[in-house]
Image: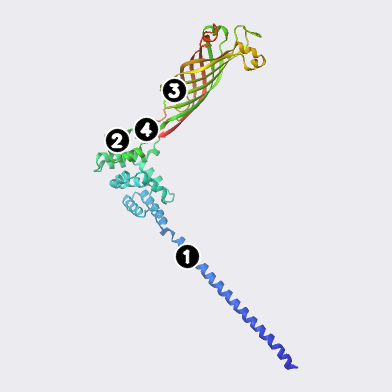
Amino acid sequence: MPVRIWCCVWPAQIQSSTYKIKSMKKIIKIAFYLIFSSNYLYSQIDSTESRILNYENSRSGLISKNRRLLLDTFIEGDIQTVKKIKDLLIKNEDDTYYALYPPEYWLILYWTTDYAELAEHIQKFDSARAVSYRTRIGPLHDMLYVKLEEKSFDNEVQLKNQIQLSPLDSETKQALNMTLDWLLLKKRENIYAQDFLNERVDSFLEIHPQSKFKDFAKTYIRYEQVLGKWGMAVEFFSGYSAYTGNLRSGYTNNVPLGVAFDICYNSFELYLRDYIGFNKTKKDFDYSAGTWDKGSRAMVFLPEASLGYVAYNSDRFKLSPFAGIGAMDIGPPTHDTQEIPELKEVALAFTTAYIAGVNLDIKFGPRNMPKYSPKTSYGFLRIRYGYSFLGFDKKYENMTGDMHYITIGLGGMGRASKRAY
């Protein structure tokens, strides 16, 4: 019996030991995996931290660090060191990175008196080079340009004296002086500063028509906006009109309401006007079904297309004589003719009218604007005098006479602008 019991227990003990061995192996594997993973993650974190700590040694980091150093050195007034740092920054530039914006670079060269380097860079600064600054990685924002601009503006006389005392030729001195004025333009509290600069450029190019600085001066220093060829305006008007001849004895003078659209091309203006006048009859008019009584309401329609020319134009006034053609109708209101169709018999149906006159526009908005930036849009008060040559007497017996009108309108003008080179 004991032997049987021992024989039965032995296999179970063997199975238990085997299971324990397998479990221990799994635990060892898991422990080894966790230890290895933790070491790998730690090494990755340590590598990232190292990279972050050493980031200032990268290209971007070196550029930013050296710019800060240049700024501090410039504020301290150590121009010799500024020059060395500038040279180091320029060496860090390539097809991917640039270290100094062009205006920063130029202002630094004024301070370090590297005029040959400055003149060469300006002469070669064409559109292709300008575009390259938009396709490369630039420096992070800092106060370098702000401080360069401020200190250069405060010491403008000193910088210009240094240029005058240099051995440069007269043409280069003038070009560098103009460029410095252009770089400091935003600091000047004078709305006409750009106009003065434009005049200097024009004078410079007149003296040196083949100057090596010609392209830079015309493309960057000189700036002027001119009005484009096309423009549009809208006007709402009212006024007073007076008849002549027999028309005056048949109808009272009329008060118009209307709208006008102007299409402008250079100095020519096409006026498209819709004139609706209100008046009354001054006598009885007989027709087949009765009489259109004295004092009855009458209406005037005068669509018009006229062409004007701007003879005078300033910040405040514009004077434009015009001439054109239209068609005029005088008769009962539409409501009355719908009720009594026979009333159409007493109407003076549309007849060709020839029109001539003059517009005076009084412009709203600021006056004495600088030449380089003309008004492209403005409101206006328009006083218009017109004389309509009517031909009713050719169709209707004894209906002689023409019409004077004066209208006063409020409107707005808009015109495109473009840069003049």
Residue 142 placement (x, y as % from top left): 43, 49
| Residue pictured at 37% horizontal, 46% vertical | 128
* Mark seen at residue 325: none
Discs 4, 3 touching: Cβ within 8 Å = no
Determine which residue is flagged by label 2: 205
For marks 2 and 1, the one nearer the N-term is: 1
Determine which residue is flagged by label 3: 317
- The quarter holding residue 193 reads top left
Q: From mark 4 to mark 1, how far is it between C-alphas? A: 59 Å
The secondary structure type at the circle numbered 1 is helix
Q: Nearer the viewer, residue 228 or 325?
A: 325
Can residue 292 be seen from the camera position used here?
Answer: no
* Mark seen at residue 47: 1
Q: Is residue 183 left or right of residue 258?
A: left
Tell me the amino acid under the disc marked 2. Leu
Q: From mark 4 to mark 3, how far is it between C-alphas? A: 22 Å
For marks 2 and 4, the one nearer the N-term is: 4
Tell me the amino acid under the disc marked 4. Asp
The secondary structure type at the circle numbered 4 is helix
Q: Residues within 10 Å of mark 3 (few under 14, many from 20)?
A: some
Q: Residues within 10 Å of mark 2 (few under 14, many from 20)?
A: some
Q: From mark 2 to mark 1, how far is it between C-alphas? A: 60 Å
Can residue 164 be seen from the camera position used here?
Answer: yes
Q: Nearer the viewer, residue 316 or 54?
A: 316
For marks 4 and 1, the one nearer the N-term is: 1
Image position of 74 with respect to 54: above or below: above
Determine which residue is flagged by label 4: 195
Tell me the amino acid under the disc marked 1. Ser
Q: From mark 2 to mark 4, how far is it between C-alphas? A: 15 Å
